[in-house]
Image: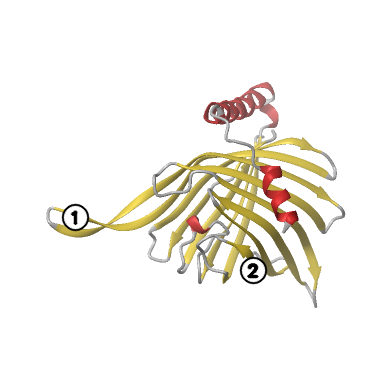
Amino acid sequence: MDLCIKIKTMFFPPFCPFANRLLLVFALAGLAQISFSQQADSTKRQLHISGSVSATNNGFSLVPTFSLGKPAVATFLNVRGRGRLSFEPEFRYSMEFKPWSFVFIWRYRLIEKNKFQLKVGTHLPALNFVTGKVIKNGVEQDAIQARRFFPVMEVIPGYAFGKNFRLGLYYLYSVGLEKELTKNNHFVSLQPAFNHIPLAGKFYLRFYPQFYYLKLDQQDGFYVAGNLILARQGIPFSVSAMMNKAIDSSINAKDFDWNVSLNYAFGRKYAEQ
């Protein structure tokens, strides 16, 4: 338990009151870089668009505030030009096509070497939706409320030890704006990545375990999670299973959760002639 206390005190300095302005400057600087690089070298403009669509039996999140707890559909996108800035939005819906969460992620590669990479990011914005009851003209109706998180900051270092194994660290800090949300949220995760575990024929596995610490205001906890993906070369469809287990936690959330998902991956590269 002494190790847990050391980890808690190591990563969480007091919130800086100028974070909103710093994040805004960061986003504008990144957009300016994309615009400038295209104008300076318009004959070589490129755009990479990739992503995936997933359908799952149980929409849960490693951060309990974002959990849905019922079948859902999610779309993940990655849009990147020749520069270091990428736009990686995430759109999640329930199976009734009610919005679950929209997260507009901007990431910038501060360091991009052969084996080591360091990215920083922000969410402009991060929205989580809940359905509640309201009275309108004397009639009770369902109403969807957007719950906002801002500022949100990410730091993501990673090192590739080989073609199929990578070790990363992920840190996220966010502030809940609505009064019912936790105000100071910290997420620190150690993330090994096994990108290609060969099986019979052209089938292979991808395995992404996590050991993470989550702090939501005064509540906190240590967890272990994992995502196992079964795929086949040449086929865009895959099947995945995800689990999350609390090790030691005071957070009001499930001690164990899991889901199974069907995924479709896509990607395309556009280049100006």
The numbered mark at residue 39 is none
Count of numbered badges drawn on the protein: 2
Give the camera-side residue of 132 and 6: 6
Quadrant of residue 241 in the image? bottom right
The percent position of residue 261, horizontal first and vertical second, equals 57, 69
- Secondary element under disc 1, as helix, strand or loop, is strand
Residue occupied by mark 1: 135
Residue found farthest to the left? 138
Q: Which residue is mark 2?
A: 238
- Residue 18 found in image quarter: top right
Name the outermost residue toward the bottom.
200
The residue that appears at 65% across and 62% down in the rendered structure is 223
Of marks 2 and 1, the one in the foreground? 1
**Along the line of sight, which residue is nearer the eye, 173 or 120?**
173
Q: Amino acid at mark 2?
A: Ser
Expressed as whole percent of the image width and height from the top left, the position of residue 254 reads 53, 68
Q: Quadrant of the C terminus?
A: top right
- Residue nearest the observer in this picture, 262 or 24: 24
- Residue 193 seen in render: yes
Q: Alpha-carbon distance for marks 2 and 1?
A: 44 Å
Instruction: Decide: is 17 above or below 96.
Output: above
Where residue 135 sits: x, y (%)? 19, 55
Quarter of the picture containing the N terminus is: bottom right
Q: Can you tell which quarter of the image residue 162 is in?
A: bottom right
